[in-house]
């Protein structure tokens, strides 16, 4: 009997946040990204009806175009991107042990395809964000360029958390009123980042293809774009794993691991492979009792647990080690 596992890409398989790195290619791009990423968090927490976590990747498109970032730039970053510690080892073991391995990522296709190929994950088992960047750039007019520059200048006066209300009001006006009235704004509507409910839809599509209910799946995620996917699998009594996760993902997972090496999950996945959820719970709780050492093997069984403040702090510490600057993003 086959076993099915699906990874988020950025975090579990590669520490780099590709969109963040792309924005760093132009002056102050990192600061622009941090404000837009915070806007993404605010809209997700508000549960705005027409918004999905991860739509940041659509929101930053005007600024990538303004600064002439290209598809080649994305490919170059992907070529330089490192893999999370133990990722190659774990994927190799899974494939040799008869698992079917999938990846559902909010990342742009130019990045996701490159990284998953490094890990020998079949392209038809990958769902990610289609992104015709070079085609979109052709729609930018001089008038629109001025509008984008004005918006960027405004964003650079804001600071995440401290200016949350202003961020929300100002970016609402830009993204919901001014930008949609332009040709570029209309073109950008075709960029649909695979986050939130779209991740769940992609997972269900894979599950339907193999006629395997979510109760038979393992999923691994770490951030706000993954919480609905984790929640769906946990509610189905599958195995939802939060790896080096933040406070937006941890409450929705079955269990968690904070470690510099994702290959630490092998013993847990062996338990799932043999006797599914019941035996996996025993293995995780045993590992939790012995606690982790230094920066590895911090396991926690989360299902039914209410107080996770200490767990969030443990993950925050390891997340910053593994993901560096990207670790502070939602």
Image: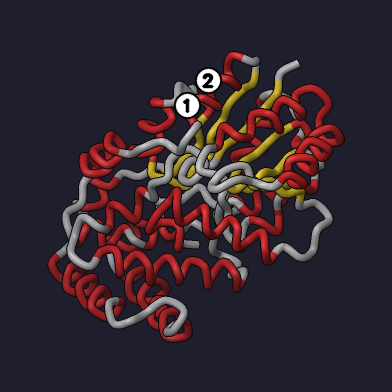
x and y percentages locating residue 249 in the rendered image: 62, 56
Please name the colour scheme applied to the rendered image.
Answer: secondary structure
x and y percentages locating residue 261 in the rendered image: 52, 38
The residue wearing badge 2 is 92
Q: Which numbered dot is residue 140? A: none
Furthest-left residue in this view:
142
**What residue do we see at 45% from left, 63% from top?**
328
- Total marks shown come to 2
Q: Name the side, left or right, on which 77 lies relative to 210.
A: left
The residue wearing badge 1 is 88
Q: Name the side, left or right, on which 109 lies relative to 236.
A: left
Furthest-right residue in this view:
278
- Name the element at disc 2: helix
Residue 172 visible at all: yes
Relative to 214, say whether 170 is above or below. below
Choose between 3 and 72: the one closer to the eye: 3
Answer few, some or many: residues within 10 Å of disc 2's Cα (few below 14, many 20 plus, some between 14 and 19).
Answer: some
Choose between 260 and 113: the one closer to the eye: 260
- Name the element at disc 1: helix
Relative to 31, say whether 98 is above or below. above
Relative to 297, say whether 51 is above or below. below
Q: Check if mark 1's residue and mark 2's residue have beta carbons within 8 Å.
A: yes
**What residue do we see at 45% from left, 21% from top?**
120
Q: State the image quarter where residue 91 is shown.
A: top right
**What residue do we see at 38% from left, 82% from top?**
170
x and y percentages locating residue 259 in the rendered image: 56, 44
Q: How far is mark 1 from mark 2, CA to CA?
A: 6 Å
Choose between 91 and 138: the one closer to the eye: 91
Quadrant in which the N terminus is drawn: top right
């Amino acid at each position: 009997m086959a076993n099915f596992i699906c990874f988020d890409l950025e975090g579990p398989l590669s520490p780099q946040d590709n969109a963040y790195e792309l924005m760093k290619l132009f002056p102050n791009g990192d600061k622009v990204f941090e404000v837009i990423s915070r806007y993404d968090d605010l809209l997700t927490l508000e549960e705005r009806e027409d918004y999905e976590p991860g739509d940041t990747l659509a929101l930053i498109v005007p600024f990538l175009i303004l600064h002439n970032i290209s598809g080649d730039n994305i490919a170059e970053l992907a070529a330089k991107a490192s893999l999370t510690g133990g990722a190659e080892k774990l994927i190799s073991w899974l494939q040799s042990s008869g698992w079917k391995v999938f990846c559902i990522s909010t990342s742009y296709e130019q990045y996701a395809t490159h990284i998953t190929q490094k890990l020998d994950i079949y392209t038809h088992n990958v769902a990610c964000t289609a992104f015709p960047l070079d085609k979109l750039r052709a729609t930018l007019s001089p008038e629109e360029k001025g509008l984008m520059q004005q918006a960027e200048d405004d964003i650079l006066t804001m600071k995440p958390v401290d200016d949350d209300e202003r961020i929300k009001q100002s970016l609402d006006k830009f993204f919901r009123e001014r930008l949609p009235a332009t040709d570029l704004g209309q073109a950008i509507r075709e960029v649909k980042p695979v986050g939130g409910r779209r991740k769940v839809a992609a997972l269900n599509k894979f599950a339907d293809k193999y006629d395997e209910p979510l109760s038979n799946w393992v999923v691994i995620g770490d951030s706000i774009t993954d919480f609905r996917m984790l929640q769906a699998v946990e509610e189905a009594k599958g195995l939802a794993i939060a790896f080096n996760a933040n406070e937006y993902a941890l409450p929705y997972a079955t269990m968690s691991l904070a470690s510099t090496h994702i290959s630490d999950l092998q013993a847990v996945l062996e338990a799932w492979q043999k006797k599914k959820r019941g035996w996996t719970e025993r293995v995780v709780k045993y590992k939790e009792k012995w606690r982790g050492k230094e920066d590895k093997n911090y396991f926690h069984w989360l299902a039914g647990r209410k107080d996770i403040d200490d767990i969030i702090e443990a993950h925050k510490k390891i997340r910053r080690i593994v993901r560096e600057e990207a670790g502070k993003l939602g």
